[in-house]
C-alpha cells in the first residue's frame, strides 16, 4: 500500500526522507553494530548523536548562547507543572493568556502552585481569536507570562509575540516550533512536545534562559528541576534516546532543506491554499478570525453536517486520512505541519472541490 497523506494533529507525519534514513540505520547505526535504541545513553556513539542534534537545533533556531536546550521526558504536558515549579521563585502569582483547550490545561495545572491571573481570555467568542496586545491585562509583579502561540484544537494562532516587558515570556510552542523563524531572545522559556514538527512522541524540548535556571524551591523533586537536567546535559536519567535521535534527523533535514525560512515559506503557502479553498466556497467554512488563523491546524465545517461521515470515508478512499475534527468541536481539521508536503494540501483542496461538486 502506498503512503497516505496523514493530517493528524499528532502524532503527525514525519518527513519520508527521515523515515528512510532511520530504516537504513535501524539495525546498525553507522557501523556500530547496534541500533540507536540499544545504545547506552552515556556511550560515545549516542553522545555524538545527542551533541549533533542540539548543535543543529541551535543553528536552525539561532538559539542564543545564554539559553540551555533540554531534551526531557513527559511531553509538553509535564511542562504545565515544571514551568511554575521552576519560575515562581519567591513570587506567588503568574499571568496566563487563555485562548483555548491547551491554555486551559496549563492554567489548571499552574493553579496548584500559585495564584493565576488570567491576563486575557477569548472564551466569550468561543476561542475564535487571539487577544490583541492592547487587551492583555498584565501584572508587572508576575513571575512570568504564559501563552499558547497556537491552539491545535481550535486552530487559533497569535500573529504577534506578546510584549511582557521585564517579565519572562513562556510559550508552549508544541505545534508551531520549527515551522518558521522566531526570535528566541524574546522568550524566557520555550517548550514543545515532539509529536508534531519534531518527530515521534515521547520527548519534550525545553529552551530556557540561563538566569531562569536554579530558582526552584527545595521541595521541587530533582526530576522536575531544570537545573538538574541542565547540569547533567539532559542525561540525569536515561532519556528517550530513540526519539532524541529521530529529532536529530529531523533537525538535519530542516537544515539541509533551506532552514526555517524555507519551512515558513512553504507552510504559509500551504495554509493560504487551504483557507482559500474554504473561503471561496459556500459548502465549507472556518470560524476563526482571519488574523488569528493557524498555519498548522485548519479546522473547517461542512454546511450540512449530515455529510461529515461521507466526507471522511471518501477522503480516506482518496488517501487523505485523520481529518476528523477534535471531539470537543466536531467538523474537520487538517493539520499541515512541516512534513506534510504541498502535494498533500493540493490533493485535499482538489478532493474538497470534487466532494462539493457531488454533494453541494
Image (cartoon, rainbow, N blue to C red):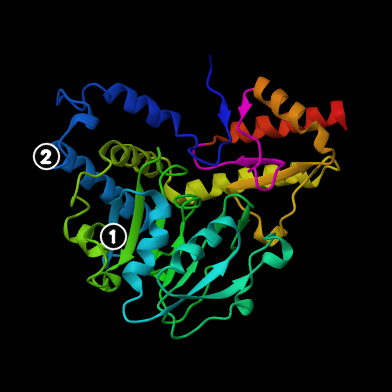
The answer to whether residue 63 is seen in the rendering is no
Residue pictured at 65% horizontal, 60% vertical: 292
Magenta stretch containing residue 199, yes or no?
no
The answer to whether residue 157 is seen in the rendering is yes
Identify the residue position indicated by label 1 in the image. 224
Question: In this view of the protein, which residue sits in the foreground, 69 or 142?
Answer: 142
Magenta stretch containing residue 321, yes or no?
yes
Decide: marks 1, 2 in contact (CB < 8 A)? no
Residue 58 place in picture, x, y as percent: 31, 55
Residue 340 place in picture, x, y as percent: 54, 36
> Magenta segment range?
319-339
Q: Main secondary structure of the magenta part?
A: loop
Secondary structure of the residue carrying numbered label 2: helix
Identify the residue position indicated by label 2 in the image. 44
Residue pictured at 20% horizontal, 60% vertical: 228
Q: Residue 320 is drawn in which quadrant?
A: top right
- Which mark is nearer the camera, 1 or 2? 1
Seen in the picture, residue 324 relative to 57 is either above or below; the reply is above
Residue 16 place in picture, x, y as percent: 44, 28
Determine whether, in the image, residue 135 is placed left or right of residue 186. Answer: right
Q: Residues within 10 Å of mark 1 (few under 14, many from 20)?
A: some
Q: Quadrant of the C terminus?
A: top right
Residue 187 place in picture, x, y as percent: 41, 68
Q: Residue 210 is drawn in which quadrant?
A: bottom left
Seen in the picture, residue 118 relative to 247 is either above or below; the reply is below
Amino acid at each position: 500500500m502506498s503512503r497516505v497523506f496523514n493530517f493528524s494533529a499528532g502524532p503527525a507525519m514525519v518527513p519520508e526522507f527521515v523515515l528512510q534514513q532511520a530504516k537504513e540505520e535501524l539495525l546498525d547505526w553507522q557501523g556500530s553494530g547496534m541500533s540507536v535504541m540499544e545504545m547506552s545513553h552515556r556511550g560515545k556513539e549516542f553522545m555524538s548523536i545527542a551533541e549533533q542534534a542540539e548543535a543543529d537545533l541551535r543553528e536552525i533556531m539561532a538559539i542564543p548562547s545564554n539559553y540551555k536546550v533540554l531534551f526531557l521526558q513527559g511531553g509538553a504536558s509535564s511542562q504545565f507543572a515544571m514551568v511554575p515549579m521552576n519560575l515562581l521563585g519567591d513570587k506567588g502569582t503568574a499571568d496566563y493568556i487563555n485562548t483555548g483547550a491547551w491554555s486551559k490545561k496549563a492554567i489548571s495545572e499552574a493553579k496548584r502552585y500559585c495564584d493565576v491571573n488570567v491576563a486575557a481570555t477569548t472564551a466569550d467568542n468561543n476561542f475564535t481569536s487571539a487577544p490583541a496586545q492592547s487587551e492583555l491585562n498584565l501584572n508587572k509583579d508576575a513571575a512570568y507570562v504564559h501563552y499558547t502561540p497556537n491552539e491545535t484544537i481550535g486552530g487559533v494562532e497569535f500573529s504577534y509575540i506578546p510584549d511582557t516587558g521585564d517579565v519572562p515570556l513562556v510559550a508552549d510552542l508544541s505545534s508551531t516550533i520549527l515551522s518558521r523563524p522566531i526570535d528566541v531572545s524574546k522568550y524566557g522559556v520555550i517548550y514543545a512536545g515532539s509529536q508534531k514538527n519534531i518527530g515521534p512522541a515521547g520527548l519534550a524540548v525545553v529552551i530556557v534562559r540561563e538566569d531562569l535556571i536554579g530558582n526552584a524551591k527545595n521541595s521541587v523533586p530533582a526530576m522536575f528541576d531544570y537545573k538538574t537536567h541542565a547540569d547533567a546535559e539532559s542525561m540525569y536519567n536515561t532519556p528517550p534516546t530513540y526519539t532524541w535521535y529521530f529529532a536529530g534527523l529531523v533537525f538535519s533535514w530542516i537544515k539541509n532543506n533551506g532552514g526555517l525560512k524555507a519551512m515558513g515559506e512553504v507552510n504559509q503557502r500551504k495554509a493560504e491554499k487551504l483557507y482559500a479553498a474554504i473561503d471561496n466556497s459556500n459548502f465549507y467554512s472556518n470560524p476563526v478570525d482571519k488574523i488569528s488563523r493557524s498555519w498548522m491546524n485548519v479546522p473547517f465545517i461542512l454546511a450540512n453536517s449530515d455529510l461529515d461521515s461521507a466526507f471522511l470515508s471518501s477522503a480516506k478512499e482518496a488517501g487523505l486520512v485523520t481529518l476528523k475534527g477534535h471531539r470537543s468541536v466536531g467538523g474537520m481539521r487538517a493539520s499541515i505541519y512541516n512534513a506534510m508536503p504541498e502535494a498533500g494540501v493540493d490533493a485535499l483542496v482538489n478532493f474538497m472541490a470534487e466532494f462539493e461538486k457531488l454533494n453541494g
